Amino acid sequence: MVSCFLEFFDDYAMPLLERFEFTFACESPYGALDTLIHGTGGQILAELRRLLADVRHLSSLSINHLLLDVADAVMLLDDVVVNSGDTLRSLQLLNITRSVYGYR
């Protein structure tokens, strides 16, 4: 809904938005040998990417517990760099991928 609002106006509609936090509350049955984790993906991931592409001039961004496949995580922040790269002062990424992955 926020993406639709931001895309409706020709001029950026939320110039006072400086901070964005997103935490995905996922299911994770602990203790099982075959741990099954349901993370973000599909439509939720597409909408989050759309929103991140629409916001501008953020000073703080926090994204937590997405538990994505590595292939989905690689380009997650590309639009953030373009739209907020000069203003971003605080970036928190926690459990973005299901497995350990070192960004290069």
Image: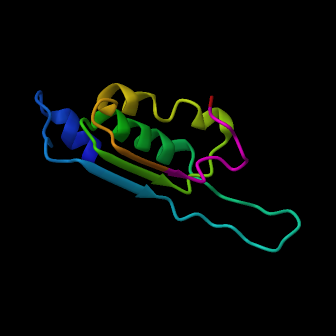
Magenta segment's dominant SS is loop
The percent position of residue 6, horizontal first and vertical second, equals: 20, 38
- State which quadrant residue 69 falls in: top right
Check the image and report above or below for 73 versus 20: above
Left or right of residue 28, residue 84 in this image: left
Q: Residue furthest bottom?
A: 31
Q: Residue at x 64, y 46 (%)?
A: 97
Residues 44 and 31: in front is 31
Q: Residue furthest front?
A: 89
Q: Is residue 54 magenta?
A: no
Q: Residue furthest right?
A: 33
Left or right of residue 32, residue 23 in this image: left
Q: Residue at x 27, y 38 (%)?
A: 55
Q: Residue at x 43, y 38 (%)?
A: 49
Left or right of residue 23, residue 101 in this image: right
Check the image and report above or below for 88 versus 27: above
The percent position of residue 61, horizontal first and vertical second, equals: 37, 48
Q: Residue at x 50, y 43 (%)?
A: 45
The percent position of residue 100, horizontal first and vertical second, equals: 72, 46
Check the image and report above or below for 2 versus 30: above
Residues 4 and 95: in front is 95
- Count the numbered circles shown: 0
Query: Which color scheme did the rendering employ for the protein?
Result: rainbow
Q: Which residues are magenta?
A: 93-103
The percent position of residue 66, horizontal first and vertical second, equals: 56, 52
- State which quadrant residue 104 falls in: top right
Check the image and report above or below for 98 versus 33: above
